[in-house]
Every structure is written in structure tokens, then in C-alpha cells.
Image (cartoon, rainbow, N blue to C red):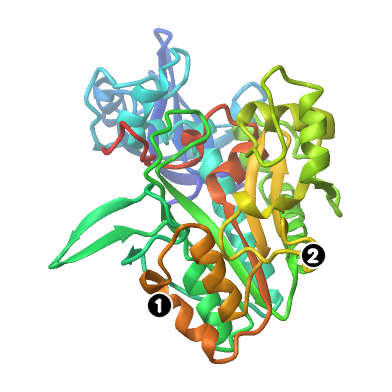
Amino acid sequence: MRMPIQAVTPETERAEILGWVHEYRDLGGLSFLLVRDRTGIIQVTIPKKKVTEQVLSSVKLVSRESVVRVAGIVKAIEKAPGGRELVPDLFEIVSMSASPLPLDVVEKVPAELDTRLDARFLDARRPRIAAVFHIRSAVMRAVHDYLFSRGFVHITTPKVVAAATEGGTELFPIAYFEKEAFLNQSPQLYKQMMMGAGFEKVFEIGPIFRAEEHNTTRHLNEATSIDAEVSFADHEDVMTLLEELVVSCYEHVAATCADALARGGFAELAVPRAPFSRLPYAEAIEIAAGGIEEPIAFGDDLSPGVERAIGEEMGEHYFVTDWPTSIRPYYAMPYEDDPSICKAFDLMHPRMELSSGAQRVHRHDMLERQLVAKGLDPASFEFYLRPFRYGMPPHAGWGLGVERFVMTMLDLPNVREAVLFPRDRHRLVP
């Protein structure tokens, strides 16, 4: 019976493994292969005078990254990976790999990111890259567990829509029979509609699409967003929810992904401490003004350079709160005593923004006024506005970008490292 490589120990005496040929060395009377599966690597030792002709003939033919089935006796050996070796009495080539390889899976020869993404199926065989996606999977599990444990309902909302979530032109138009349609920027409007339906706590994990012409290490045109919305809550309530979710994800990865972190060569995970600092926008731009040369004034959005300057000062996760109403979406709730400031926030890592959220406007008349103030036509949002006429509770929520979350957790240099098949301004395949 096939065994995962990680489970093979000298105490098993005999094992059968299936995996890929990671490396091969021929030392004359002795050959060594490293065979890899998703759990790890094992050394296959072939003393040429002590194995069968079937084993020798198959080993002569095999190429790196071929899939093989190997069976034999497992022995303890200190210098071998994992402290064990397998001496085969069966060596079968299940699927031969072509040569040369598009990139070096052993990672002795570095490859540019574009080369790696063009052959992502092969790139993902590399232990470090595979580790990223095992850890990302663990993050997703932690998100589901955390939100389900707090009574949230999982929902799915449309990705083909008739109107932009936030207005503006950064949309992907698509052909949808005789109608104008777009790929959705966010599930925002639908989350709010479910508050009107009485669901109280909802979340969704799904793709979002932004037609921004960026070509940076932190932007994607198709990303994955974790979105949550809560009734009878304000911005402070959902900031607490968000910081607790972030800490829970870090704790889960630290507790369950030690092997993946080690295989990937990642540093020991430092779990952030909650509560995170709350930094009002006005104070944030004061900090930035002292650390950068670019001019910044109240009412300006935070550029990447500004974010980095503030992040260097803060040194850990933090929230930027109390944003100018003029630069936040129409659905952000203004403060009653100063409508020029709204109950919006961004969750920041020292490197970049991870999440945006706010308490939402729940009154129909105010929401309609704010649409008009943003230069948007309320008639285009009638499907969204209608529930607000029939008893909409106060509510708040946020969206958290998965790729940036994983990127900052593992200190990856490029957000494309945190998604299997990235979509950006230039990349549409594979």
C-alpha cells in the first residue's frame, strides 16, 4: 500500500511510495535518488550489485520529475533526508518527464517570476512554493472556522452585475446577451441587502475584479476577498471582529503548519497582538508628512509611499480610522457631530493595506443623498436601494484581501506569489 513519504520510518521495515524524482546522482557502484511527494522527500539508495535488473534498467531510463513507484526496505541513515533511506526491490516509471525542464524544481538555478508563472504546474512542485499554498489553505480553514464559530452564515453573491459597487470606471465590461454587464468589484451591495433580509451575520469568500491599470508587486486584477457584514453593529464592533480573525489565522498557521513553514524556509511566525492600534486619519498624515518628501494634505488618499512611512513608524498591524467622508464610498456612515468625517477604517500591515471597512449608511434618504453627492444616479442603484425602504438595521462590515494577507504573513516579495494563477494587466494564461 502506498505511504506518504513523511510517514515512512525505519520502523515500517517495508514501504511503497509514489512521487516525483527530485534529484539523481550516479556514483558508479552506488546511485541515489530523492523522491518527493506533497509530504516531503526520501532518499532511494541503489547499490547496483544488490538490486534486481528490473530496478537497474528502470533507474537508467528515468529522468528528473518523472513519476515513479518505488517499494523496498526502509533503513535508518543519519545523513539522508529525514534520517532514512529506502533500498528498492521494485522501481517502476509511472510517467516519464520530458527533458529539459522549463525550470529547475530543485531551485539550484533561479528562474524569473514570469518563467515560473508560465510553468506554474511545475513551479508549484517546488517545496517552497507548495508550502505557500498549503499555508494559504490553512488560512482559509481558519477563516471559516472562526466565522462559523461566531454564528455567521456563508453566502454566495453574483459576480456578473449591472452596476458598479462603488461607481467609477474601473470595471471589466462583459457581453451579457442584450444587456450591459460588468464583473463585480465587491459583494458589498449584496452583503448589505442580506442585512435587510434579517441574516444578521454573513460572510463570503470569492473573487473580485478591478480593472485598474496597475503593474506593481501589490496589485492584481482578479483577487480573492473575505467579506463580512454584521447587523446591529458599528465600525468598532467589526474592527474587533477583524483583528480577532487575523490573530486566529496566525495562531492556526503557527500551530498546524510547522512542517510547511520549515519546508518553505519561512521564519517562525510571529502572532500579532490584539487589540491593534487605532490611528485617526488626521494623525496618520501627520506621521507621513514627517517621513516622506511627497506633499500630503488632509483629504488625500494614502499612496504606497505614505503607507510605508506610517508602517515604519507603527511597526505592526494597525487601523487607520475616521477618514474624510469625501474620499470614502457613498455607503460609509458619517459621524453625527461632524459629517465631514466618517466611520470608515483600513486595516494596515506595516507594508500595505489589507482591508477596508466601515459602518454603513442604513437610512434610505441619507444613502440616496450620498449617491447624488458622489455624482452617481440613484436610479442605477434601485435594486440596491429598495431594501432600505423596508426596515434596514444598522450594520457594518469589511473586506480582507486573501493574497495580501498571505503575502504579508509570509513576507513574500510579490502578491503574485500568493495566488496560483494570477491575473494582472498582462497575464491571462495559464
Q: Residues within 10 Å of mark 1 (few under 14, many from 20)?
A: few
Three-letter amino acid code of the residue under disc 1: Glu
Judge by depth and name the residue closer to the eye, 378 or 401.
378
Task: For mark 2, give the secondary structure.
Answer: helix
Residue assigned mark 1: 382
Q: Quadrant of the C terminus?
A: top left
Q: Residue at x 59, y 28 (%)?
A: 81
Residue displayed at 41% across by 47% down: 210
Q: Position of residue 29 (x, y in %)?
A: 41, 11
Q: Position of residue 266 (x, y in %)?
A: 66, 31
Q: Which mark is residue 16?
A: none
Q: Nearer the viewer, mark 1 or mark 2?
A: 1
Q: Is residue 45 above or below residue 108?
A: below
The residue at 38%/29% (across/down) is 21
Which residue is the extreme one toward the top? 28
Q: Nearer the viewer, residue 407 or 157?
A: 157
Residue topped by disc 2: 236
Instruction: Name the foreground residue: 240 vs 182.
Output: 182
Is residue 39 visible in the rendered image? The answer is: no
Q: Is residue 381 left or right of residue 365?
A: left
Viewer-closest of 264 and 9: 264
**Residue 64 in the image, given as x and y percentages of width and height:** 33, 24
In which quarter of the view is residue 116 placed?
top left
Distance from the alpha carbon under mark 1 to that under mark 2 = 29 Å
